[in-house]
Image (cartoon, helix red, strand yellow):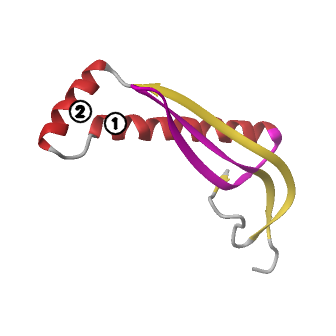
Amino acid sequence: MIVTNTSEIPGYRVVRWLGLVKGNTVRATHFGRDLMASLRQIVGGELKEYTDMLANARAEAERRMVEEAIKLGANAVLNVRFVSGNITTNSAEILVYGTAVVVEPIRGE
């Protein structure tokens, strides 16, 4: 599966547009992580607990989007975008969306 944030893939042409696909997840922080992050805010530095949580959430949301694209028969997703937002004080939603397509290599390139 090709996943890209561009509208075209060099060396390929779109032969069928299948529509919008998306994946999302809502993640809540763990009390222990919140405590460690709060302490780190005092001294400064990266909040690694949150960085890791959001990286895992993005990967899960993308996996769900790809699964939806595969069900439609796609072999690529174009124009992929990530959006995040707070649901409550200690939780965040990650949404990823794009256009599911079928692509084939351009002959002669």
Decide which of 1, 59 is in the foreground and name it: 59
Q: Are marks 1 and 2 in contact (CB under 8 Å)?
A: yes
Q: Which residue is mark 1?
A: 50
Q: Please tell me how crowded label 2 is: few (under 14), some (14-19), or many (20+) other residues with Cα within 10 Å.
A: some
Residue at which label 2 appears: 37
Seen as rendered, the residue at the extreme top is 31
Position above or below: 34 against 6? above
Q: Residue furthest right?
A: 16
* Amino acid marked by disc 2: Ala
Going 20% across and 29% down the picture, which residue do you hit? 36
Residue at (67, 41) in percent of width and height: 66
- First to last magenta residue range: 72-99
Q: Give the Cα separation between the discs numbered 1 and 2.
A: 8 Å
Quick one: SS at disc 1?
A: helix
The picture quadrant where one finds residue 49 is top left
Q: Quadrant of residue 30?
A: top left
| Residue under the point 27% across and 26% down | 33
Q: Secondary structure at mark 2?
A: helix
Residue 26: % across, % down: 52, 27
